[in-house]
Image: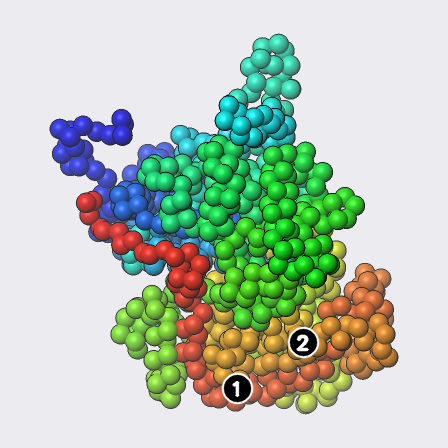
Amino acid sequence: IEASIPEGQRAAWRKYSAQEFKTKDEFDSEVVKHIETTLARSLFNCDEAAAYAGTALAFRDRLIIEWNRTQQQQTAADPKRVYYLSLEFLMGRALDNAMLNTGMKNIASEGLEDLGFRMEDVISQERDAALGNGGLGRLAACFLDSLATLNYPAWGYALRYRYGIFKQEIIDGYQVEIPDYWLDFNPWEFPRHDVTVDVQFYGNVRKYTDGSGKQISVWENGEIVTAVAYDAPIPGYGTKTTNNLRLWSSKASHGEFDFTKFNSGEYEASVADQQRAETISAVLYPNDSLERGKELRLKQQYFWCAASLFDIVRRFKKSRKAWKEFPNQVAIQLNDTHPTLAIPELQRILIDQEGLEWDEAWSIVQKTFGYTNHTVLPEALEKWSVPLIQHLLPRHLQIIYDINLNFLQYVERNFPKDRDMLSRVSIIEESQPKMVRMAYLAVIGSHKVNGVAELHSDLIKTTIFKDFVKIYGPDKFTNVTNGITPRRWLHQANPRLSELIASKLGGYDFLRDLTQLHKLESYVDDKEFRKEFQEIKYANKVRLAKYIKEVNGIAVNPSSLFDIQVKRMHEYKRQQLNIFGVIHRYLELKDMSPEERKKVQPRVSIFGGKAAPGYWMAKTVIHLINQVSKVVNSDKDIGDALKVVFLEDYNVSKAEMITPASDISEHISTAGTEASGTSNMKFVLNGGLIIGTCDGANIEITREVGEDNIFLFGNLSEDVEDLRHHHFYGEFQLDPSLDRVFKTIREGAFGDAGQFSALVNSIVDHGDYYLVSDDFKSYLDTQKLIDEAYKNQEEWLTKTITSVARMGFFSSDRCIDEYAEMIWNVEPVKVQGQES
Ligand code: CR6
């Protein structure tokens, strides 16, 4: 308030207030100004990178004006806000999205042309913001887009990693990891050196009794690290709302270096503290659905939770409302268990700092938090050792023990006969050392727990959280099936298809209400429409073929069936099933006469995805794919009948090019292991069909598009346990086709067989945990059906168009509305264009 401009001077201020560019000329003038001043370049040394920088800065300025306006109006309205805590936001590129969401792309294209640049070249200069691993991080990014588009007052909170997910290079068929130093030039972030939070680690807890006889705990003598906020504006589509993604960066609390040490000549020690502090936000852990229990990771989690909660509480306190109003003003969603420490942290703030009684504080905490579970895989469920938490966060450990004590007393009262129940549901696992089960803490500290697709939400209720359903009743558990933003995954990735749809639906409203796509069904038989739809698919395949030629040096025929599996490399996702299928296809082709071979449906098998650097088996699968690719592509007998491609460094911007080019995409996880999947939705929305198992969102996609428009195969999740048991105790008969594939590998057809023995043995000797052999035959049969179906191009086209028309359910706008209503209880706030 003290910093606001006096009434008398505000007219002058308003007169000179920053304005968004509206015309092509205004845009050009912004771009040139930035290139000449911000970048200190001229028309004699302006390359595409500079043109990108100028364009990005022009749009950055525009977004910040809308961002400021949004924040002012939201502050005035003081509504309940949503805070989405996610350690990952896989944003990808920002410029194209900013242009499309603000509706200024055409103007910018024309403007750039005036200045001598092509829009496509400028866009492709941008590096991805890759602060995530896979689906979980990309889901968070889609949610931000939907929150802004639907005008919800919402904030994302994460860490500003200096290094995002590594870049993948393939050298001699092996994955090599290269650090991704993405902050070289990032025009989208605003450092807020005035928004800082001091976060404490280590230290001890002192207890004393105050004058009124109340027990007080003080956490003291710890090490302080400072969190600095960096903000990135998130524009909604076709709305004035621009929300905020706040990323915390760590630095030493005493600044650049410790002057006492510096002055006494301890130069190295004086900077060592600084480096230790900066290490906290230095790097994203590159594991997808795997937790490794490293101390630095726990430090990251607490640092981020503490800074975010301080910020949220500070904003709440500005409105001077009573504490009991907190859950009416604040909804915090925990994206997986990574931010679970926010639960004891809020309890700590309320009881230790704000002086609330335990019960009152705890009821506020439970009403504030919601928790989303994204996996049932045991290796992904976070547990932290009690000694580690004791050392790093001594006060939080006490609070966790108190939460557990109250909870177990409640359970004991309600289930006096079930003696084992207590040890089963205790937050503390009685192992050596003892462990804190973060998922249990998240369930106990939240008012709602949701899974991310129907099957998955059912599974969590019958497996990992079974006892909690008994304790709390079924209503605490719910489902919100994942979705994707149609702005990026249709309009931006496939502009021609978006335009075709708009031409039939009378404009781009479907991008804000995706269910309108259903009207496309009446064009299924429209000749003109079918032709254009097919042409667009072909053009997208040509574009990908061109890229493959450039990067991999492999010539693929765009009229072949493009079969794509791109996602993180993981045994449960079963890229090994796919590549074994490819080897089988290759062997069959080799068995054929040249005449027979001419009759088969030509196919290009395309793979892409990163393996966690320490995930040896996943790296072996990458290696096998590349070896098979080498052999098959250079086999003169085979020609166009089969090509195998591994696309290096799969990321969001590549996904935008790859997704629209598929005929078939593969979502073939062992039933019950893929919580949802989201790329399955992207592929169908872009006119590709799916081969998939009855898993995750595949099931709901089937419900929507119809059984005739998807190729399902394999065992069901209810049979998985018995099948696994059978591998160990039953009589095991390897499928003969798979046996032949393994023989071929063992004979060295794809290079040194020893390299692949662990992979083969995991199936033959070690129980085939992911049931590759059980599903192999049904997989091959289904691939045959696909070859047949693809030959009838007219029928295929009907299937793809019908499927697109039926994908309306999978917009992330629908998810966000469900969260808002069922979990957050928040309302949109309409932001006005002019300053009020
Ligand atoms: N790995 C699930 O495995 C789901 C996303 C987003 C995952 C995937 O099926 O679509 O989350 N789980 O809900 C985790 O990250 C733990 C993922 O991306």
Q: Looking at the picture, how far across and down is residue 256, in whole percent?
A: 53, 22
Seen at 23% across and 51% down, the residue is 832
**Mark positioned earlier in the residue sequence (1 or 2):** 1
Quarter residue 58 falls in = top left
Left or right side of 106 for 339:
right
The quadrant of the rendered image in which ligand 1 is seen is bottom right
Judged by depth in the image, the label closer to the viewer, 1 or 2, is 2
Q: Nearer the viewer, residue 458 or 15?
A: 458
Circle 1 residue: 708
Question: 604 or 285, which lies in front?
Answer: 285
* Residue 532 shows in this picture: yes
The correct choice, above or below, for 75 with respect to 559 in the image is above
Look at label 2 and name its amino acid: Glu
Answer with the quarter of the image where residue 536 lies. Answer: bottom left
* Residue designated by label 2: 718
x then y, percent, for residue 535: 42, 77
Query: Which secondary structure, mark 1?
Result: helix
**Residue plotted at (46% across, 55% down):** 141
Question: Residue flagged by tag 1: what amino acid is it?
Answer: Asp
